[in-house]
Amino acid sequence: MKKLLAILMASAMVLTVAGCGGGGNSSSTGSESSSTPEGGEEVKFSSAMVTDVGGVNDQSFNQSAWEGLQTAQKDMGIEVKYIESKQEAEYGPNLEILSDEGHDLIWGVGFMLQSAVMDAAAKNPETMYALVDSDFGADAPKNTIGVLFRAQEPSFLVGYIAGKVTETDKVGFVGGMKSETIDQFEYGFRAGVAYAAKELDKEIAVDVQYANSFGDSGLGKSIAQKMYAEGCDIVFHAAGNVGVGVIEAAKENDKWVIGVDQDQNHLAPDNVLTSAMKMVGKAMNIVIQDMIDGKDLGGQTLVFGIKEGCAGIAPTSEKNVPEDVLADTIVLEEKIVSEEIVPPYSEDTFNAFIESLAK
């Protein structure tokens, strides 16, 4: 098991770079920051990103993306930059700023940017755009790349952990905004809880609530406070900056919380049980390296998960997850890779999964 944990830790380290997010210069539509290769070597490739409203320091999705670009800058010698969006109306203008600057690959981080990225791609057919957590369908323009994740896979694993660890037999899930992307987290988590409940031969309730926001940490804290007061002893969030409030509520109530996207244990070492990691930055680096190598990715949708080393549970899980539970979780991870277990990602696939458990 120690060998497998070491592999997990090594995978996560690719996202860890100094100076996460950092400050930036102000622009007309948000804040921006850029970075050039160390040592002043010649830049042969440049990549830039536009955040969603969660911001680059959301301790989650956007921050993972920016850290990934910083790693690419260090390891591949490319130029990188971000522009932070404060509101949805800034997506289009921010993308246009980057388009005018002539970057080789421009990223929209989050499904909320899909429309703005489509518009930018139509206006700038010579520029390549990539969109994280969404795609462009069967008729995707040749200057676009969709990047999707099987987020249901790590969510299933942390759900299983929650089901094995809960003492009240009631856990919670806080989502940001209802969407196909967040459905993966919700239904994967609920399926993992159900799988554990079957092993334990008992019922475990899952309270599900949505904040309809990715940026309001105060609202996240309020929702989690209520969940804990009503008997949940573990809450999993997939809600960007809203989740920071969920973690704060866990600290104040001395309860467990499960982080998302990044290893969030550092935010509350005694309360973050584990984290469902979606290694956005690592997937972005794979795409960038493929482009540098001359691969034609235009019009494609690329999907990443545990098998590709772009998802899993946090390496710090060994701090708070009981050793026997962690060992069982690693076995389940191997079954997901072999497709012996296929975690659900939607209401329909979840219902089918639950039916299969009953047989």
Image: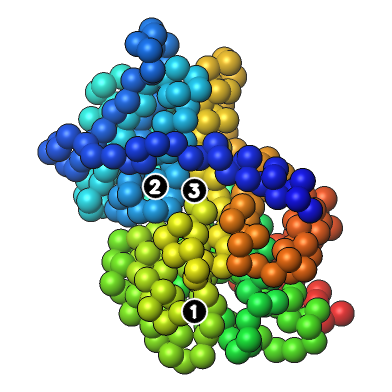
- The residue closer to the viewer here, 339 or 142, is 339
Residue sitting at 39 percent across and 46 percent down? Answer: 63
Query: Is label 2 or label 1 in front?
Result: 1
- The residue closer to the viewer here, 247 or 195, is 247
Identified by mark 2, the residue type is Asn
Label 3 CA crowd tier, 10 Å (few <14, some 14–19, many 20+): many
190 versus 122 height, above or below: below
According to the picture, the residue beneath numbered tag 3 turns out to be 133
292 versus 246 height, above or below: above
- The residue closer to the viewer here, 352 or 336, is 336
According to the picture, the residue beneath numbered tag 2 turns out to be 62
- The residue closer to the viewer here, 203 or 317, is 317
The quadrant of the image that shows the C terminus is bottom right
Indicate the position of residue 340 as horizontal and vertical percent values: 84, 58
Local SS, label 3: loop
129 versus 188 height, above or below: above
Indicate the position of residue 236 as horizontal and vertical percent values: 52, 70
Query: Is label 1 or label 3 in front?
Result: 1
- Position of 237 compared to 213: left or right? right
Count of numbered badges drawn on the protein: 3
* Labels 1 and 3 touching (C-beta < 8 A): no
- Position of 184 compared to 217: left or right? right
The earlier-in-sequence mark between 2 and 1 is 2
